[in-house]
Structures are given as structure tokens and as C-alpha cells.
Image (cartoon, rainbow, N blue to C red):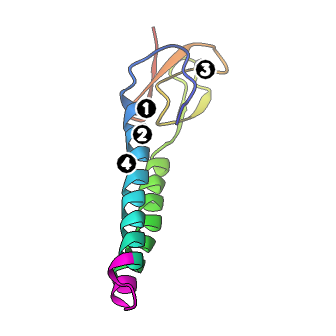
Amino acid sequence: MAEETTQAAKPRRTFDSAYGFSFSVAVGLILFIAGLIISLTVGQGTSIGLIFGIPLLVAGLIIPLFMLRDLFVTAEIKEPCPNCGATIRTSDATLQLRCDSCQKVINVRERQLFLGE
Ligand SMILES: [Zn+2]
């Protein structure tokens, strides 16, 4: 999540990723705990708790994985440097970076690379 940036830049994209991460973990936790509570309390001695509890437990584990996968799938960027043309590999979470070849500051916006100030 915390990609290195050369200086304090607009934190919008990083905030989105961090928010998505926290949100998916929170959803997973809530489902997991709800499933745990239901299977341990509501259905004591019967199978009702397991019928409702186990799917919630499983969903609590699987849903965050799917949500996190989406976050990471969109993260890869491989574009030529707008200044020198050298291929730059970075992630969507990066706001600003420095080109390895020409040392120019590059801004990352909407999966595109723009020459910085
Ligand atoms: Zn460059």
C-alpha cells in the first residue's frame, strides 16, 4: 500500500486503495465473527447454527480475498517514460516516482505517466 513517493502528493489514489483494503478486511471480519457467533450460540445442539454459521465463516474468508485481488489486478502499470522513453514499471497506488533513466519526476494519474514539474 505505502508506495514510496518523492514528495507529499495528492493522496487520493493511495487513500482509495487503503480504504478498499480496510473495507474488505472489515467485511470479512464482520462475516467471520457473525458466522462464529451464530454457529456457537443460535444453533447450540442443533444443525441450524452450522447451516447459517459455516457459510458466513467461509464468506468472511473468501470475500476479502476477491476484493483484495481486484485491488491488486488493477495495480500494475508498465508505460514508457514521457521524457526519455525508458520503460517504467510501477503500481496504480504510486502517485509520483522518479524515472530510473533520466531522473525526472513522473506523476501517475489514471494509469498513465505524466512528466512532473
Ligand atoms: Zn525517463
Q: Where is residue 36 in the image (x, y as percent from the top left)?
A: 42, 71
Pick whichever, 100 or 57, lies toward us: 57
State the residue position of label 4. 23
For the residues labelled 1 and 4, the Cα–Cα distance comes to 14 Å
Query: Which of labels 2 and 4 is toward the front?
Result: 4
Label 3 crowd bin: few (<14), some (14–19), many (20+), radius 10 Å: many
Marked residue nearer the N-terminal end (3 or 2): 2
Q: Position of residue 56 (x, y in %)?
A: 38, 72
Segment tinted magenta in the rendering: 41-51
Query: Which of labels 1 and 4 is toward the front?
Result: 4
For the residues labelled 3 and 1, the Cα–Cα distance comes to 20 Å
Question: For numbered disc 2, what is the local secondary structure?
Answer: helix
Pick whichever, 101 or 42, lies toward us: 42
Marked residue nearer the N-terminal end (3 or 1): 1
CB contact under 8 Å: marks 3 and 2: no
Q: Is 58 included in the stretch rendered in magenta?
A: no
State the residue position of label 1. 14
Q: Is residue 103 above or below residue 60?
A: above
Query: Is the residue indicated by label 3 positioned so its CB lies within 8 Å of ligand 1?
Result: yes
Occupied quadrant, residue 110:
top left
For the residues labelled 1 and 2, the Cα–Cα distance comes to 5 Å
Q: In this view, does 63 lie above or below 71?
A: below
Marked residue nearer the N-terminal end (1 or 4): 1
State the residue position of label 2. 17
CB contact under 8 Å: marks 4 and 3: no
Marked residue nearer the N-terminal end (2 or 4): 2
Q: What residue type is labelled 4?
A: Phe
Task: Name the quarter showing ligand 1.
Answer: top right
Query: Which of labels 3 and 1 is toward the front?
Result: 1
Label 2 crowd bin: few (<14), some (14–19), many (20+), radius 10 Å: some
Question: For numbered disc 4, what is the local secondary structure?
Answer: helix
For the residues labelled 4 and 3, the Cα–Cα distance comes to 33 Å
